[in-house]
Image: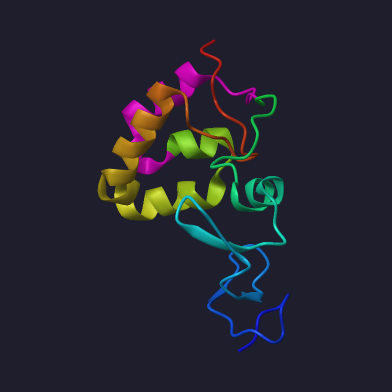
Protein backbone atom coordinates (compact mmCIF):
# COMPACT_ATOMS: atom_id res chain seq x y z
CA UNK A 1 0.00 0.00 0.00
CA UNK A 2 1.17 3.46 -0.85
CA UNK A 3 1.12 6.75 1.07
CA UNK A 4 -1.82 9.03 0.32
CA UNK A 5 0.44 12.11 0.05
CA UNK A 6 3.48 10.37 -1.51
CA UNK A 7 2.35 7.64 -3.95
CA UNK A 8 5.96 6.61 -4.56
CA UNK A 9 6.52 5.68 -0.88
CA UNK A 10 5.38 2.62 1.06
CA UNK A 11 2.70 3.26 3.72
CA UNK A 12 3.50 2.44 7.34
CA UNK A 13 0.16 3.23 8.99
CA UNK A 14 -3.37 4.55 8.75
CA UNK A 15 -4.46 7.98 9.96
CA UNK A 16 -6.94 7.74 12.85
CA UNK A 17 -8.72 10.89 11.64
CA UNK A 18 -9.21 10.41 7.89
CA UNK A 19 -8.40 6.71 7.44
CA UNK A 20 -5.80 7.36 4.71
CA UNK A 21 -2.47 5.53 4.52
CA UNK A 22 0.70 7.50 5.34
CA UNK A 23 4.47 7.00 5.01
CA UNK A 24 7.19 7.66 7.62
CA UNK A 25 7.59 11.23 6.31
CA UNK A 26 3.90 11.97 6.89
CA UNK A 27 3.71 10.43 10.37
CA UNK A 28 2.56 12.67 13.22
CA UNK A 29 2.35 11.04 16.64
CA UNK A 30 0.24 12.84 19.22
CA UNK A 31 -0.28 11.27 22.64
CA UNK A 32 0.23 7.76 21.30
CA UNK A 33 -2.05 8.14 18.27
CA UNK A 34 -0.76 8.27 14.71
CA UNK A 35 -2.03 10.84 12.24
CA UNK A 36 -1.06 11.90 8.73
CA UNK A 37 0.77 15.19 8.25
CA UNK A 38 -2.25 16.82 6.58
CA UNK A 39 -3.95 17.08 9.97
CA UNK A 40 -2.78 20.01 12.04
CA UNK A 41 -3.07 20.03 15.81
CA UNK A 42 -6.41 21.88 15.52
CA UNK A 43 -7.86 19.28 13.17
CA UNK A 44 -6.61 16.45 15.37
CA UNK A 45 -8.18 18.03 18.44
CA UNK A 46 -11.52 18.77 16.78
CA UNK A 47 -11.94 15.34 15.24
CA UNK A 48 -10.56 13.13 18.00
CA UNK A 49 -11.94 14.72 21.17
CA UNK A 50 -15.60 13.96 21.70
CA UNK A 51 -17.59 15.00 24.77
CA UNK A 52 -18.45 12.19 27.17
CA UNK A 53 -21.97 13.48 27.71
CA UNK A 54 -24.27 15.59 25.55
CA UNK A 55 -24.39 19.27 26.47
CA UNK A 56 -26.57 20.02 29.46
CA UNK A 57 -29.77 21.74 28.46
CA UNK A 58 -32.51 23.21 30.58
CA UNK A 59 -33.87 20.45 32.77
CA UNK A 60 -37.50 19.61 32.17
CA UNK A 61 -39.38 18.74 35.34
CA UNK A 62 -42.37 16.47 35.48
CA UNK A 63 -45.58 17.93 36.86
CA UNK A 64 -46.00 14.77 38.96
CA UNK A 65 -45.26 14.91 42.69
CA UNK A 66 -42.09 13.18 43.81
CA UNK A 67 -43.49 12.66 47.31
CA UNK A 68 -46.64 10.99 45.98
CA UNK A 69 -44.54 8.84 43.68
CA UNK A 70 -42.27 7.82 46.56
CA UNK A 71 -45.20 6.92 48.84
CA UNK A 72 -46.88 4.92 46.07
CA UNK A 73 -43.60 3.16 45.30
CA UNK A 74 -42.90 2.37 48.95
CA UNK A 75 -46.40 1.03 49.67
CA UNK A 76 -47.44 -0.47 46.33
CA UNK A 77 -44.19 -0.61 44.32
CA UNK A 78 -44.44 -4.35 43.93
CA UNK A 79 -47.67 -3.70 41.95
CA UNK A 80 -46.13 -0.89 39.89
CA UNK A 81 -48.69 1.69 41.08
CA UNK A 82 -46.03 4.46 41.03
CA UNK A 83 -45.33 3.66 37.37
CA UNK A 84 -49.00 3.96 36.47
CA UNK A 85 -49.03 7.29 38.35
CA UNK A 86 -46.24 8.78 36.22
CA UNK A 87 -47.61 7.43 32.94
CA UNK A 88 -45.40 4.39 32.38
CA UNK A 89 -48.25 2.00 31.64
CA UNK A 90 -46.34 -0.85 29.91
CA UNK A 91 -43.74 -1.16 32.67
CA UNK A 92 -46.46 -0.73 35.29
CA UNK A 93 -48.18 -3.77 33.84
CA UNK A 94 -44.86 -5.64 33.82
CA UNK A 95 -44.44 -4.82 37.53
CA UNK A 96 -47.94 -6.18 38.23
CA UNK A 97 -47.14 -9.45 36.46
CA UNK A 98 -43.68 -9.90 38.04
CA UNK A 99 -44.30 -8.38 41.50
CA UNK A 100 -42.04 -5.38 40.90
CA UNK A 101 -39.54 -7.32 38.80
CA UNK A 102 -39.17 -9.74 41.70
CA UNK A 103 -38.46 -6.87 44.09
CA UNK A 104 -35.36 -5.67 42.27
CA UNK A 105 -37.19 -3.12 40.10
CA UNK A 106 -39.11 -1.92 43.14
CA UNK A 107 -35.85 -1.29 45.03
CA UNK A 108 -34.18 0.42 42.05
CA UNK A 109 -37.19 2.69 41.50
CA UNK A 110 -37.26 3.65 45.19
CA UNK A 111 -33.60 4.65 45.04
CA UNK A 112 -34.10 6.57 41.76
CA UNK A 113 -37.02 8.50 43.26
CA UNK A 114 -35.06 9.30 46.43
CA UNK A 115 -32.05 10.66 44.51
CA UNK A 116 -34.22 12.56 42.01
CA UNK A 117 -33.42 10.57 38.86
CA UNK A 118 -36.78 8.86 38.26
CA UNK A 119 -38.43 9.86 34.95
CA UNK A 120 -42.08 9.95 34.01
CA UNK A 121 -43.67 8.60 30.83
CA UNK A 122 -42.57 11.71 28.90
CA UNK A 123 -38.93 11.30 29.99
CA UNK A 124 -39.18 14.30 32.35
CA UNK A 125 -37.51 13.96 35.74
CA UNK A 126 -39.87 13.71 38.73
CA UNK A 127 -38.24 16.29 41.05
CA UNK A 128 -41.00 18.39 42.63
CA UNK A 129 -41.64 17.27 46.25
CA UNK A 130 -45.08 18.90 46.63
Q: Which residues are magenta?
A: 61-80
Q: Report the residue that reaches farthest toward the top.
A: 130
Q: Is residue 38 left or right of residue 49?
A: right
The part of the image, by quadrant, that contains residue 72 is top left
Residue 102 location (% of width, % of height): 26, 50
Residue 93 location (% of width, % of height): 46, 51
Q: Quadrant of the C terminus?
A: top right
Query: Residue, x 72% and y 85% (percent of image)?
Result: 7
Q: Is residue 37 left or right of residue 51?
A: right
Q: Report the residue that reaches farthest toward the left.
A: 103
Query: Residue, x 45% and y 55% (percent of image)?
Result: 32
Is residue 46 or residue 87 the one in the foreground?
A: 46
Q: What secondary structure is the magenta-colored segment mainly?
A: helix
Residue 44 location (% of width, % of height): 64, 51
Is residue 124 or residue 78 the one in the foreground?
A: 124
Report how many numbered discs are placed on residues in the image. Answer: 0
Residue 26, compared with residue 109, is above or below; it is below
Is residue 107 or residue 28 the one in the foreground?
A: 28
Query: Residue, x 57% and y 35% (percent of image)?
Result: 120
Is residue 31 or residue 115 the one in the foreground?
A: 31
Q: Quadrant of the N terminus?
A: bottom right
Query: Residue, x 55% and y 47% (percent of image)?
Result: 89
Residue 70, compared with residue 7, is above or below; it is above
Instruction: State how the image is colored.
Output: rainbow
**Residue 45 lies in the magenta stretch:** no
Residue 4 location (% of width, % of height): 71, 78
Amino acid sequence: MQCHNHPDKEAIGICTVCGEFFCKDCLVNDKGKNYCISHTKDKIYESSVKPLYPPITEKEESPKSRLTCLILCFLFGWLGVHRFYVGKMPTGLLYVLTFGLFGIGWLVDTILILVGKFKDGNQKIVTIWS
